Image (spheres, helix red, strand yellow):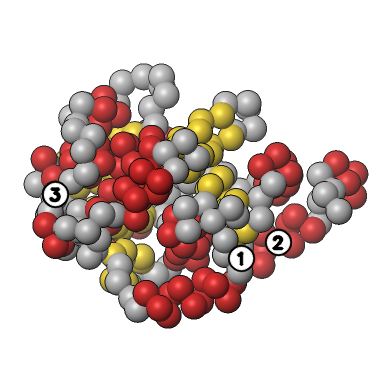
Amino acid sequence: MPDDILTIYAQAQPDKPGVIDDKPDGTVVVWTYAELETRANKVANLLLSLGAKPGQKILWCGPNSPEAVAVMSASRKIGAIAVPLNYRLTPEEALYVINHSDAEIAYVDYEHAPMFADLRGQLEKVRHIIAVAGNGQGPAPDGMLTDADIAAAPASPPDVGEAGGTGGSMIYTSGTTGKPKGAYRSGGGDPEQIGALLNLFGYRPDDIYITSGPLYHSGPSAFMGASLIFGQTIVVQRKFDAEDWLRLVDKYKVSSTFSAPALVRMICALPKEVKDRYDRS
């Protein structure tokens, strides 16, 4: 089984920051590439112990976070299909997507674990729920696994043979013309074409990428994945805030992002005195 791209970078640049979560309240979490690799391996091995297999769906739900990057990487490592759930959906809307996705394991941010607890009696296929990023917020709802279970899992790269890295993602449409539909994208692709496209964008290993918008959308998650391909540092903003986005760009000398036009307009509409505070020209 060839080494996963994250495993390669964890060996080549173990101390380089892989993911940075710098919250407005001053809380800063930095995972090096070695730490991100360890966390992703632990998540992957826990998923396998719960019965996950290559080609199966792993549903995840929550704001942008290092934990979200870890489960996306873990799913790739075991050849599973990552299914992001829009955390802004109503419980009724979320229930439809969860059941329709065929996922048997859900990986959920503590912030949204209560919704899953409320829906538990209506979940048709989900057998296990992992509540992550607790950070001292108290016990998870009854019956849910937690960060402690992830911590107890093996840190070695998961072994699924040639199936490793063969998964993909399934992102649901908004459902404006009926029920939401899952759009599957394989994790493969012509390496030469992908490389040529990223080189056209001017991506370099020393770029710093910041998430602009939620990773449950295809654009932000795809460009975040491209950052990992190049071994870049990723700054995750839990939820978009225009002024705090400028703070992060200034603090970490961010050089790359993917953004919807609406977010750019919000940044441009900030008062001049705010923008001047972070002017790097």
- Specify the amino acid type for callout 3: Asp
Is the residue under label 3 in contact with that under label 1 (CB below 8 Å)?
no
Distance of label 1 from label 3 (alpha carbons) = 38 Å
Q: Which of 12 and 166 is in front in this view?
A: 12
- Specify the amino acid type for callout 2: Val
Q: Is mark 3 on a helix, strand or loop?
A: loop
Q: Name the residue under label 1.
A: 260
Residue 17 in view of the camera: yes
Please give the name of the residue rendered at 74% of the width and 62% of the height, measured from the top-left corner.
265
The disc, 1 or 3, on the residue closer to the chain's N-terminal end is 3
Please give the name of the residue rendered at 88% of the width and 46% of the height, measured from the top-left corner.
276
Q: Is 31 situated left or right of 45 in this image?
A: right
Q: Nearer the viewer, residue 36 or 179?
A: 36
Q: Quadrant of the N terminus?
A: bottom left
Distance of label 3 from label 2 (alpha carbons) = 42 Å
Please give the name of the residue rendered at 43% of the width and 75% of the height, measured from the top-left corner.
194
Q: Which mark is residue 159?
A: 3
Please give the name of the residue rendered at 47% of the width and 53% of the height, measured from the top-left corner.
231
**Image coordinates for residue 188, horizontal then vertical, percent:** 30, 71
Question: How many numbered circles are shown?
Answer: 3
Mark 1, other Cα within 10 Å: few <14 / some 14–19 / many ≥20: few
Q: Name the residue under label 2.
A: 264
Q: Is 239 situated left or right of 53 in this image?
A: right
Is the residue under label 1 in contact with that under label 2 (CB below 8 Å)?
yes
Mark 3, other Cα within 10 Å: few <14 / some 14–19 / many ≥20: some
Q: Is mark 2 on a helix, strand or loop?
A: helix
Asked where in the image residue 97 lies, by quadrant, the reply is bottom left
Up the image or down, 61 lies above or below 84; here it is above
Distance of label 2 from label 1 (alpha carbons) = 7 Å
**Image coordinates for residue 88, horizontal then vertical, percent:** 46, 51
